[in-house]
Amino acid sequence: MYKTIVIQYSPKADDMAQKIEEKANEMLQNGYELVTMSITGAAKAILVFKK
């Protein structure tokens, strides 16, 4: 099973990296592994997880 999550607007790279890391760790505790991610031009991140 796949799950997609969007990290909302975060224009600073350090902030974006921290939000991605926090979400990846949270999802890992729920049995999901980060498969891929993409950063949009609107400073959002799309994370795809697989269970």
Image (spheres, rainbow, N blue to C red):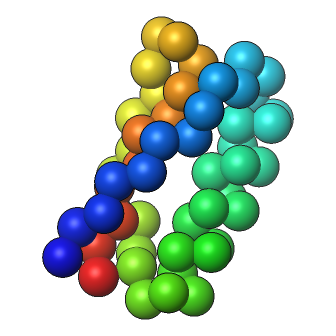
Q: Which residue corresponds to the image point at 47% horizontal and 28% vertical from the top-left?
A: 39
Q: Is residue 45 left or right of residue 21?
A: left
- The correct choice, above or below, for 19 with respect to 27 in the image is above
Q: Residue at x 71, y 62 (%)?
A: 22
Counting from the top left corner in percent of width and height, residue 37 is at 40, 45
From this view, report whether residue 45 is shown above or below residue 28.
above
Q: Nearer the viewer, residue 3 or 41?
A: 3
Q: Quadrant of residue 14?
A: top right
At which x and y percent is residue 28? Answer: 52, 81
Q: Residue at x 40, y 79 (%)?
A: 32
Q: Position of residue 30 (x, y in %)?
A: 50, 87
Point out the image quarter for the C terminus: bottom left
Please give left or right for residue 49 compared with residue 12 in the image.
Answer: left
Q: Quadrant of the N terminus?
A: bottom left
Task: Name which residue lies at 44% across and 20% down.
Answer: 40
Residue situated furthest top in the rendering: 41
Q: Position of residue 26 (x, y in %)?
A: 62, 75
